[in-house]
Amino acid sequence: MLQLKEYQQRALDWLSAYLRRCQSSRDADEAFYHITRQTFGRGIPYTPVDELPGLPYVCLRIPTGGGKTLVACHAVAIAAHELLHSDRPLVLWLTPSNAIREQTIQALNNPNHPYRQAIEATAGPTSVMDVSQALYLQPATLKSGTTIIVATMQAFRVDDTEGRKVYESSGALMSHFNNLPEELKTGLESVNGAVKFSLANVLYMRRPILIVDEAHNARTPLSFKVLARFNPSCILEFTATPATKENPSNVLHSVSAAELKAEAMIKMPIRLKVRSRWKELLSDAIAERISLEAAARAEQNQTSEYLRPIMLLQAQPRSQRKETLTVEVVRKTLLADFNIPENQVARSTGEIDELEGKDLSQPGCPIRYVITVQALREGWDCPFAYVLCSVAESYSSTAIEQILGRVLRLPKAARKQHEALNLAYVFSTSENFGAVVNQLEYSLIQNGFEKQEVQAMIQQIRQEEQPGLPLFSSRRPLAEPVSISLASEPAFELLPPELASSVSYDAGAGKLTIQAQLDPEECRLLRDALPGAAAKYAIDRLLGKIVQADGADLVPPAERGERLAVPQLVVLHDQQAELFEETSFLSIPWRLSQCDYRLVESDYSANRPLGHGLEIDISDQGKLKEEFISTLQQNTALFSTDLGWTAVELVYWLDRAIPHPDISWGEANAFLTRLVMHLIEGRGLTLDQLVLDKYRLRDAAAEKINAHRQATHQKAYQSFLLPDSQTPLAFRPEFSFIYPPDAYPYNTLYKGNYVFTRHYYPQVGDLEGHGEEFECAQFLDGLPEVHTWVRNLERRPNHSFWLQTSTDRFYPDFVCQLQDGRLLVVEYKGADRWSNDDSVEKRMIGELWEKRSQGKCLFVMPKGKDLEAIRNKIQW
């Protein structure tokens, strides 16, 4: 099974946390506010579905190239186990088009495809079908494992031929309604008092999990009404571009471009070149592709990986009013003017598709140029696409966006030895360079990237017609563009072209916008070009935001090639050193079978929470919302086929359902057997009760085991810290975490007004522009003793420095390289949390790390706003 990337696993962890919170609080709204307070730093109001009060409805935002379908496959089991408490869920998987539907069905049915492997590894045996096959779905299929019906939203609308069949009674589905419990009849569509044997009714009873691919296309009032007819248990959106205005998506977690780049999922940055003459542009683009192919051959010699860079050419549509650069004109130019072999060129339009049936990834495929107009075949995915060349000059927002995503994916999600193969390339015909930049930025946003990220994603190649300019701009974009009011347009003719391209003037709004940091001389030139004393004064007031320092500081240490390495603690075994991490004490055997196995009433209540059915008046919407989770699980239990289990089978199920890599099978089996038998013999619960309630029992048993585990780990952990430990902790510089200079996977970008000048990376990640942590960062940035510092990202084990605690990895807030060569690690704690158990343990391991370094490293945890403690530590 394909291993998940860090950011993919993190997204799933937040989804799991959300559904567990729904389970405990019985409130999808409260759970969303609670989790987003952790994912975004602030609680976000929940937008409910009016037709389905209480329904958990959340979105995971993953940009183009981030593998959202793979994440969706893993999400099926999470929803089934954490929310439905079911091993055999029914899933309705909605796609945005028929083409994507067919591709999804093909992938999910292919036992060698990562999607199918992910589903079966997490959700068990799986049946996959389309709507036409689902019209003959039998109960035996639903009882045998996970069932996935893949369809488009249109397939469920009554004005669609296939959609009408979904709501029609069919004898093929009659067996689903035999001996139907009264609780399940409420809400089913009927005719003359008789329940219809329809697929819609089967779905309604079975409470399907709804997986919605590119869900922003499904968020309309009509779509909600259609979805409500199937009585879903939850709706999980996976999209690059969530709805933000009408019916906004409930974005639970958002993945950034930096996270995709750090995991080598996308080519970044994008090199952009603009020319006014299209044949010259085409010549440049062809030369770039040929250069990339030479790099690809060298890459293959080094790594054996085959690559064949492909160019996507965007031509103009035919017009009866004027001559245009059509697909045929571009193709003829490639063949006649540039001597491109005919078998290397393929057309892909609505009228002709020469890519049909071809696998472009195969070494024997000759295609190197693909000509299209608006969009390639939907769902077309070829990581070999490196160059996008658009000769269709257009300022419309959709001109590039439809095919830009096709050149973003990095082949095999792995960085290449040759840096040129880690980038994407866009060539565009235009007289207006700024308009193309704006269009490309908008296109990136439409592919799911944040507005604040896109400027850093574009590396602008200046037009060669402008002599004296650097080939690539080294200018750093502002995290947030700065605007000032002007009564009239600046004298742009007085500005150098590169400076002029970094500012723009909106005559209608009367505003000048500065989009990039300027050096002091550029600021003076801009000031001289502004009309009136008020405008010059406004620029002077903004100097702190827009001016970069002189000299080498223009380029941050990571981009200058400076190394930032932080030694980590190691465990010594007979003078052999290994990194001190969780496995150091996980490997110490412990006897779970000797621990207390009894679950008392406060651990596991004999009274199973039950819903009150669905016969609730419209005026009782609040009550219905509160009862949604309980009613859902009660309805799911009605389809359980688990009765008749033996105690041994229940213990076996619990053993598989509770992760315990540090506990042997014999120890776990003995503990769980005693736990189950105590509930039956000691507390008088029946085996059928326990089996019916096995997921709640799983949670209680897992919590009991974890409490014993934590107590054991705490004891083992403490033994490593003792001076006379047989396996002492030591300090070894050769065991150092080294910050990757080209990968900084922040989730959110700092957008404050203060300009940090000493941060190791060009951007500062996961830091608000206000608050106590910001004040601490600002304090560090201003200390003369600090050479460079980095905002240390939490839960990024491959990209951040960490120290092991008894329960988790501790990621300090800031890591600093001092001017004298020492390292300073700072963990900021509010005064109200400075003395809690978590802070005490972090302080203990941090101070031990400092002590073992023998003066090479410093650790400080200032108490609240006592930032002078940092200065005192440095001077200590």
Image: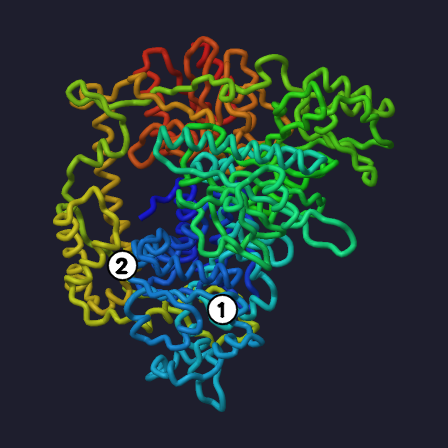
Task: Where is residue 252? Give x, y as percent.
Answer: 50, 49
Measured as percent of width and height from the top left, residue 186 is found at 45, 79
Q: Residue at x 51, y 75 (%)?
A: 163
| Quadrant in which the C terminus appears | top left
State the residue in front, 424 or 642. Answer: 424
What type is the residue that disc 2 sits on?
Leu
Using the image, determine if residue 264 lies above or below residue 678.
above
Q: Is residue 511 left or right of residue 620?
A: right
* Disc 2: which residue: 697
Label 2 CA crowd tier, 10 Å (few <14, some 14–19, many 20+) = some
Q: What's the residue type where badge 1 is placed?
A: Leu
Q: Visible in this render: residue 36?
A: no
Residue under pointer 1: 624
The figure's colour scheme reads rainbow
Q: Is residue 542 left or right of residue 576?
A: right
Query: Where residue 402 sits in the image (x, y, percent)?
Result: 59, 49
Rounded to the nearest angstrom, the CA distance separating label 1 from label 2 is: 26 Å
Determine the image quadrant of residue 270.
top right
